[in-house]
Image: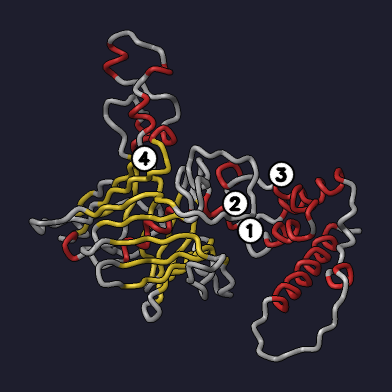
Amino acid sequence: MSFKSILRDLKEVRDGLGGISKRGWSKSSHIAPDHTVTPSENIPQSPWASLPPELLHEIIRRVEESETAWPARAAVVSCASVCKSWRGITMETVRVPEQCGKLTFPISLKQPGPRDLPIQCFIKRNRATATYILYYGLMPSEMENDKLLLAARRVRRATCTDFVISLSAKNFSRRSSTYVGKLRSGFLGTKFTIYDNQTGSSTAQAQPKQASPKLPATSYTSGSITYELNVLRTRGPRRMYCVMDSIPLSSVISEPSVVKEEVSSGSTDKENISPSLLDQPLVLKNKSPRWHEQLQCWCLNFKGRVTVASVKNFQLVADIDPSLDALPEEHERVILQFGKIGKDIFTMDYRYPLSAFQAFAICISSFDTKPACEG
């Protein structure tokens, strides 16, 4: 049997199971006669469930390596949906985004991105519905079949504003299984807090070897964002700082950093070198733009990913203490960049140690009105 026929059968199994799920959760008010059937009659058994483990490993490995982009990568998710044995082997085969640079399961959105090249996404804003949709890809496709990653809806309250973040653009209920967290702003819209409903998965310290499809539901504070007040109304871009409570500073430094004072004293014991500095939360700050005389505006090198000038455009780099002997490229490495490319369309590129969820939360904070922060 050809490899393509295997993928076709997997899709049929997935579609069949999906139809059963939809019928089971239907909320129709019609009353149907009770036809009780045994579990074996109700749930179709996959003909692929009894494959030898060695052959099964090879099939899933080939599927994972060949289907690298969405929507074709849905075949990998189909493998995890066949049965328990397929799910287990798929979890062993699919690597985390940090290692493979791909987003496969929902849990991938809470895991750090790749170290070498950023994951490129884009955000569509809908002003009428106050929603913001994150898609996987360079820019919107002509077929409009882009892979939806996350969606956020702005909810204004008396003393704050919430951005509820979900896996679905149609369901923003906190009681739903699609709810993944929220971003809450203060009264002035200059301070934000990121709340994550998943314990520990988006930290750079957690290094799972497999990409588990499940998402546990526990809430904790993932980070905070602060926009500096521009009291004097001086000309210039917004200034922002992001404190990532779940990510240590050591995650952006290639080697254990050496404090200059200790180097001068002759200490070379890396285990005793300023652990408090290395273990403190990672702080991200704006990369300083340069003033372009001809264009009469502030400029940053977005490498072609941003084409429209906007006060919302930014690049974030790590705020590393000068006393640490960090490499120059570690000070300049862009961890997250966000910018406008068209009407209500923005690009979002992120890399390790941020996750897609954290990067998305930081970016949508720029959509809240901040007149006190702009020059």
In space, the residues marked 1 and 3 are separated at their CA atoms by 19 Å
Dot 4 lies on which element? strand
Instruction: Evaluate if marks 2 and 4 touch, with contact meaning CB atoms under 8 Å apart.
Output: no
Compared across the picture, whether 53 is left or right of 153 comes to right
Q: Give the mark nearer the N terminus: 1 vs 3.
A: 1
Q: Give the mark nearer the N terminus: 2 vs 4.
A: 2
Dot 2 lies on which element? loop
**Label 3 sits on residue:** 92
In space, the residues marked 1 and 2 are separated at their CA atoms by 8 Å
Q: Residue at x 14, y 56 (%)?
A: 230
Instruction: Evaluate if marks 1 and 2 touch, with contact meaning CB atoms under 8 Å apart.
Output: no
Residue 66 on image: x %, y %: 72, 53
Residue 250, above or below 214: above
Residue 144 on image: x %, y %: 56, 74
Q: Amino acid at mark 4?
A: Leu
In space, the residues marked 1 and 4 are separated at their CA atoms by 31 Å
Q: 10 Å neighbourhood of mark 2: few (<14), some, or many (≥20)?
A: some
Q: Given this view, does label 1 or label 3 mark the residue nearer the observer?
A: 3
Instruction: Evaluate if marks 1 and 4 touch, with contact meaning CB atoms under 8 Å apart.
Output: no
**Label 2 sits on residue:** 102
Q: Residue at x 85, y 68 (%)?
A: 39
Q: Give the mark nearer the N terminus: 4 vs 3.
A: 3
Compared across the picture, whether 145 is left or right of 368 comes to right
Q: Give the mark nearer the N terminus: 1 vs 4.
A: 1
Q: 10 Å neighbourhood of mark 3: few (<14), some, or many (≥20)?
A: some
Image coloring type = secondary structure
In space, the residues marked 4 and 3 are separated at their CA atoms by 30 Å
**Label 1 sits on residue:** 69
Q: Give the mark nearer the N terminus: 1 vs 2.
A: 1
**Label 4 sits on residue:** 282
Q: Single out the residue that lies furthest toward the bottom.
A: 30
